[in-house]
Amino acid sequence: MPSQILFNTCPLCDQSKVTWQTAELVFRCDHCGLTLKERTLLGLFKKGRYNVTSFGQGNFSLAEQGLTKAALSADALKVTIGNVYPDEQLAEIAAGNLALLRPVRTILAAIILEQLNEACFLQVLDLRRGHGQPLTDQNSYLPTGAAPRQDMAWQDEGNLFCTTNRLVFPSDRFTFIRTDRKLVAVQAFTDGMAVQRKGESYATYFIGCHPHEAALVAAYVMAKVPALQKNLIES
């Protein structure tokens, strides 16, 4: 029998535990309704791998595109679900309502906080950073298909953090992108997002995430740089 508790604190609502429901053979948060199921392969459990079967009440169309089919470890799933927000809240974040964001409480986020003395609002795992096609001035947090790969100059790999004043990509180069007026465009894709800085002939792409994570990072950038909201496309 699986452990009775998968998460002591639900990564979606931060209000309750995610516990085993014997009758249904799933894990569920009694507060928000988040429901997770251990994946099977040829009738056998893939030990420690889970997917989302329900986000409970609310419109989570972007999150459903990736997480209802993904099989993730509990640790990776906790971070990924921590980036899930209803579609309506994503629109509000893009329009500037950062108060909706839940705090990030992972060890990696704590390290960033200690190093930079800045709060960490978002964390996205296992991305590739590249320099690619420049963006136009049409900004959107809504994914518009896969990111273009043509002429992409890959730089490094790592985890992306959104802090009080910047995008942080720790790697052997430890890249910083300040969320200031020099950011002139942002675009979400189904597999990543990109930002354009003034004076650069390329956009910086972060590739390898779920659609809802790309949307959230792009919405966060738009909230931090109000000038990018002029072409805001709401869901």
Image: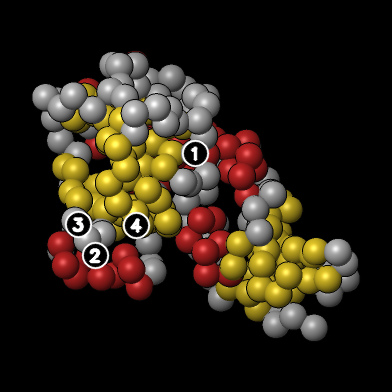
- For label 2, the residue is 112
Distance of label 3 from label 4 (alpha carbons): 9 Å
Looking at the figure, which quarter contains the N terminus?
A: bottom right
- For label 3, the residue is 174
> In the drawing, what numbered circle is on residue 58?
none
Q: Earlier in the sequence, mark 3 or mark 2?
A: 2
Distance of label 3 from label 2 (alpha carbons): 11 Å
- Out of 19 and 152, give the one closest to the viewer: 152
Secondary structure beneath disc 3?
Answer: loop
- Out of 103 and 72, give the one closest to the viewer: 72
- Give the image location of residue 228, x and y in percent: 27, 24
User: Which three-letter amino acid code belongs to the residue tagged 4?
Assistant: Gly
Distance of label 1 from label 3 (alpha carbons): 22 Å
Q: Earlier in the sequence, mark 1 or mark 3?
A: 3
Up the image or down, 97 lies above or below 55; here it is: above
Secondary structure beneath disc 4?
Answer: strand
- For label 4, the residue is 158
Up the image or down, 131 lies above or below 116; here it is: above
Nearer to us of marks 2 and 4 is 4
